[in-house]
Amino acid sequence: MTTPAAAMNDPRVRWFHARRFTLRPGDAPELLRASGDSGFVAHLTACTQGATGWDWSFRLVKPGHGWAFLSDGKLTLFVDEPGQYVPAEAKAGDVVALRLPRARENLHPHRFSLFGGQGGCVVGKGYAKLFLPVTYEASPHLVEAFSSKWADQLRFSLYVANSPHDFERADSALIDVGPDDEAGVVRVLEAFVRQYPSALVPRGIPYATKEGPLGVGRVDVTAKTDLCDGYGWRRSDEAVRGVISSS
């Protein structure tokens, strides 16, 4: 299977991805910084108003009196603030949730990421992808809506283009969300559109997706590699190479 990085370096795949998946009116812009426009990213971060949430990808490594070491398998953290992880009665080896900022500025190239109040998308049971053609002007309001109390009990991953020059596409924002949280995410999205009726600009339905809530592209997937922009690059690569895929 071709990796996303390899697919992005193939000019045929880049053309297909731009014209058939993101449905751009022209070629993709030259984006020199994967971390995006620093001023715009800072503005999106400010729109979260410091929202924090629970990240359930950690295990308790070693508990102590008023302190603990937690690890997600890659990073080990020392915490000594009361209530910084739950459940408080967890024992070494147990899965725990760590309270962290919900904004993730550099999690994926060319995207600003925001997790739900209960963490990011759960991949295990399969998940849905929603492709949102949000405008540059409305994108800060989208981040604000999904940082609000209405998203406190939800698990999802929202990704927004992190450059002002990258919004002429059908997936200028996208959401990965599991089956237990999709209805809640759609309710937040519907409330957002009611408040900002011009926020989503019709651009068509991306290749290999179907029309979903509010007329946006939607698809069910299972692979972790399909998170964020992975699905679009995979399906574009398969289309160029003539590979038949069931998802």
Image (cartoon, grey):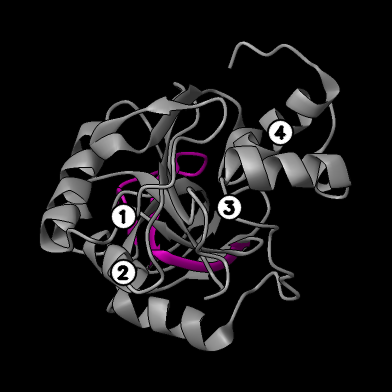
How many neighbours does mark 2 have within 10 angstroms: few (below 14), some (14-19), or many (20 or more)?
Answer: some
Asked if one can make out residue 44 in the rendered structure from this viewpoint, the answer is: yes
At x 80%, y 40%, the residue is 13
The amino acid beneath tag 4 is Ser
Q: In which quarter of the image is residue 95?
A: top left
- Measured from the top left, where is residue 115 in percent x and y? 39, 55
Q: Quadrant of residue 136?
A: bottom left
Q: What's the CA distance linking mark 1 and mark 3?
A: 15 Å
Q: What's the CA distance linking mark 3 and mark 2?
A: 18 Å
**Magenta span:** 85-107
The label number, if any, that marks residue 24 in the structure image: 3
At x 57%, y 30%, the residue is 207
How many neighbours does mark 4 have within 10 angstroms: few (below 14), some (14-19), or many (20 or more)?
Answer: many
Q: Name the residue under label 2.
A: 138
Q: Name the residue under label 1.
A: 200
Q: Which of marks 1 and 3 is nearer the N terminus?
A: 3
Q: What's the CA distance linking mark 2 and mark 4?
A: 28 Å
* Relative vertical location of residue 13 with respect to residue 127 in this rendering, above or below: below
